[in-house]
Amino acid sequence: MHSAAAEPPLPLLPFGHVAHERLGMPYPAPPGSLSPSAPPAGGVPEQVAYTRDASIYDSRTSTFDTYRRQLVDLLPLRPGDVVLDVGCGTGLCFEQVRDRIGAEGAIVGVDASREMLEVAAARVAARGWRNVLLVQSAVEQAELPAVDHVLFCATHDVLQSDAALDNVLAHVRDGGTVAATGGKWAPPWAIALNAGILALHAPYVRNFTGFDRPWNRLESRLERLRVREVAMGGGYLASGTVPSRIVPLGAGPLDRESDDAGPRQARR
Ligand SMILES: C[S@@+](CC[C@H](N)C(=O)[O-])C[C@H]1O[C@@H](n2cnc3c(N)ncnc32)[C@H](O)[C@@H]1O
C-alpha cells in the first residue's frame, strides 16, 4: 500500500499564500508546504507508475501532450478563474492552464500519489508560480475549495468512482465546465489496436471496467455533454457543464407563502 499515510506533510514547495488566502481553505501547513487533505491518499492502491517511476512519468507519457492541450482548450478559461486538476499527477496540464488564468487565478491539483506530487511541486517551484495549491489525498475524500472549472486528464479510475465525482462536482460552481480525456477501447473488431491500448494503459489503470465508455458517469451528472473520439477510437475528449443547483422558491411545499414574492431564488 501507499506509504505516504504514515508520513508527515512534505516540507516543500508550492502553494503560494496568495492562492491559500484566495481559496479560503483551512490549511494548517505554512505557505510553501504541500497540503495533505486528511486522510492522505486513503484507499488508493499503490501503482509503480506513480511511485517508483514518477520521475520518468513525463517522458513516458509525452505523446499524450496533444490531448492534454486539447483538453485544456475545452475549458472556457478566463483570467482569475480557479481550476481543479483532478489526478494532476506531475502537473503536466498546469502550464497551459496557468497561461489562461494568469497570476490572479489559481490551480488546485489533487492527487493521491506523494511521488507524483513531488514532481509537480518541483515544476511549480521552477516556474515561480505562487497560485498553485497541491493537495495530497484520494479524490473521494479530498477537502476542496469552490472552483470554476475542472479537468480530468488520464484519470480513468477516478471517473469510475461515484464518490470521487460527487465530491468533485459538489465544489464546481453552477455552469462550470468539466472536461475529461483519456484512453478507451477502440471498436471490438480492432483487435490489434486494442492490444496496443491495453499495453499502453495497463501501468496507469487499476481497473478497465467502463473503458468502453469512460465518460458514462459524467453523462448523468452534467449538461450538454459532448464526446469526441480520437486516436482511431482509442481515446476521447469530453466536456459538459455543471447543472444549476438554484431552485426557485415556490417550487417546494415550504415555499407556498412566497408564491407572490417574485423571482427570488435559493440554493438547494
Ligand atoms: C495517468 S496519471 C494522470 C496524471 C496527469 N493528469 C496527466 O495528465 O498526466 C493518473 C493520476 O491519478 C492519480 N489518482 C488515481 N486515482 C486517484 C484517486 N482516487 N485519488 C487521487 N488521485 C488518484 C494517480 O496517483 C496519478 O497521479
Image: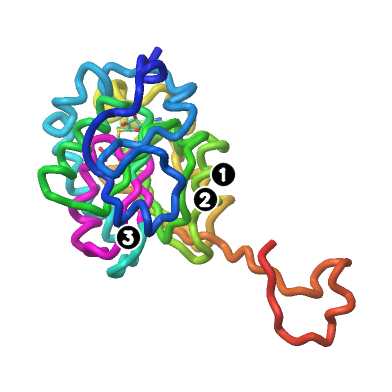
Judged from the image, the secondary structure of the residue bearing numbered disc 3 is loop
Inter-mark Cα distance, 2 to 3: 17 Å
Quickly name the residue at label 1: 166
Q: Which residue is mark 3?
A: 74
Label 3 Cα neighbours within 10 Å, binned few <14 / some 14-19 / many ≥20: some
> In this view of the protein, which residue sits in the foreground, 188 or 15?
15
Give the SS element for disc 1.
helix
Q: Nearer the viewer, residue 227 or 7?
A: 7
Residue 95 colored magenta?
yes
Q: Point out residue 78 in the picture as x, y percentages from the top left corner.
A: 30, 69
Position of residue 168 in the picture relative to residue 108 (left or right): right
Q: Give x and y (percent) for residue 128.
A: 13, 50
| Mark 2 close to ligand 1, CB under 8 Å | no
Q: Residue at x 34, y 64 (%)?
A: 81
Tag 1 near tag 2, CB within 8 Å: yes
Q: Which residue is mark 2?
A: 169
The residue type indicated by label 2 comes to: Leu
The mark lying in front, picked from 3 and 1, is: 1
Q: Measured from the top left, where is residue 7 in percent x and y?
A: 35, 19
Q: Is residue 217 shown left or right of residue 147?
A: right
Q: Give coordinates of residue 59: x percent, y percent.
A: 11, 32
Q: Magenta residues, as a range? A: 83-108
